[in-house]
Amino acid sequence: MRTIHFDLYYDGVKWIAKNDRIVVSGKTLEELDENLKLKLKDIFKNGKIKVSMELDFRKVIPHWMWQYHPYYFYRTVYLDLD
Amino acid sequence: MGERRWTKGMFDTEDWWAFWIGIFFVILGLVAAATYNVETKIGVDLTGWIVSFPKWVDISKSLSVDKYHKGFMSGPVAAVVSYVIFTIATCIGARAMKWDVKKYFVAWTIIYWLTVIIYILSRNAYIQATSLELKKYGIEWSLQLGGAHYIAALIIGLIIGNLAPRGFREFLRRAARPEWYIKIAIVCLGTKLGLKGIEATGYAVHLILAGCCATIAAYLLFWPLAYTVSRKVFKLTKEWAACLASGISICGVSASIATAGAIRARPIVPVMISSLIVVFAVIELIVLPYVLAYAPFWGLNEPMAAGASLGLTVKTDGADAAAGAILDELLRARAANELGVQWEEGWITAAAVMTKIWIDMFIGIWAFVLAVIWVYHFERRPGERVEKMEIWWRFPKFVLGYFIAMFAIWGLGLGGIIPTEALKWGIHPIEGPMRHLFFMLTFTSIGLVTDFRELKKEGLGRLAVAYAFILVVIIIPIGWFIAWLFHHGMKPPVVKP
């Protein structure tokens, strides 16, 4: 199965998934996943894809909080493009 | 960024660097112990340089080294050597974590020497000597303020952190890392249970198991009650209620972040809740030790239960260990003055830390459970999977250092591989002076990073009221009861004459 990685951000209004080739956003994570599915279908046409997303901890959590916990969350989503 | 391995963060997170630094110095102590000859009393002294701060009447005697290493070097030289070595160790960590090392170094230097000065001044025997020690110091009176050095460091830190020019306090905060320093100190504390476990395995095991039982009971009661009150009484949404419930009933900021991550909350949620947690933790740190030390039911009757209750009610590792250390000093001073008994130092602190460590350990499991419930039931997102590795990624790694230190000493001592006398010689500077120094650095840092103005921020009003209500009405009373249930009757070991 193909695996694609994204950095995940939250800009205060929407979630953004980004890598070297693709940028997708959504107001909720559900909307983000839907938009991601549409974008990946454009590129790969069909098949099942494992999407791995990592929220960039240091961009969304203030510096003073970093010492308390090592990361925010990772997401793994399996998208069926068929 | 690629596939996430189990080694992720091993060399670039504070949690792991508390493990590496703590374990490095524990290994130094064990190597020293291995070289020690119990007949000639000679060994390769790898830990005798760590500075110690005894009580003093003559200020020229305010700096020293560990009691098993007298004569290795003078106190002032030890203070400088300790500064150099701990600076190198923490700067290596800072570099690996991609901090601005030059700025960290300058801020660390200021904090280190400020802490040393506070430590020296507040250890004066007229301030701290107990009634049993007056004759030893040749004085007729003393304020008998056990723990004054900790309170002094906290107060001075708070003054700077709240009143100093903004640029200066922001600069110092680069090296004001209370969680990092206390985690290093907790790894050192593991050696204490290790050494005690050789002499009194039953006592050490009882303390460990009692902490575990108390934690399980607390998790099962605290979180559901805190969540229900947040939703029904304060009308918080599920997102806010879950993070607040975790923050206030489990392990504070860490739990708030872990829960917010588990339920995929917006980042603003754990940030605002965490602001409250650290401020309330400092308030608890100032108030609870005195309440527990002097309340009739607690105090001298239930010292270990009182210590354990702090682990269940004070919500950051730094503030909990700090509160435990203050309570330890207060109760030992009371026992000496009122009962004529000298309790061994550090056991009440160990009780406070032990319950907190169990709470910290379970956060990975709890976050995983919440993630499963949220992702698969509350907010179903087709295709999303919760990875079991989250339990490991969220597991507090400094706890590994604590238990490795403890079990290594048990194994070497109980197995007869290294004599107990040799282990004490090598390890005691880590268990004693190094731990105390990093506790002091934690107190100063807590003060520096705590800004009471956070409470004025918009939107925090209802959250602050909810937090205070749940803390006072649910967490503290139930925490006290659970701590008493599993620890009643336990007293700290008495110092052997």
Image (tube, coloured by chain):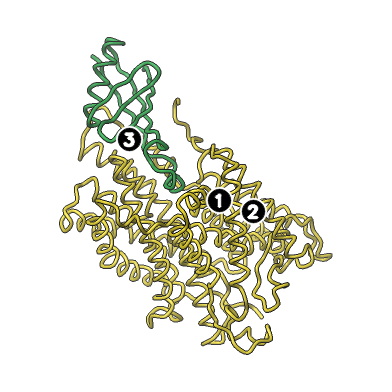
Chain colours: A green, B yellow
User: What percent of the width, then of the height, locates residue B48?
Assistant: 73, 60
Camera-nearest residue between B219 and B230:
B230
- Is there CB contact under 8 Å for labels 1 and 3? no
Q: Earlier in the sequence, mark 3 or mark 2?
A: 2
What element does badge 3 sit on?
loop
- Residue picked out by circle 3: B386
Amino acid identity at mark 3: Val
Camera-nearest residue between B244 and B79:
B79
Q: Earlier in the sequence, mark 2 or mark 1?
A: 2
Q: Which mark is residue B26?
A: 2
In which image quadrant can residue A39 be found? top left
- Residue picked out by circle 1: B401
Give the residue at x 34% y 46%.
B271
Amino acid identity at mark 2: Val
Q: Chain of mark 2?
A: B
User: What percent of the width, then of the height, locates residue B60?
Assistant: 73, 72
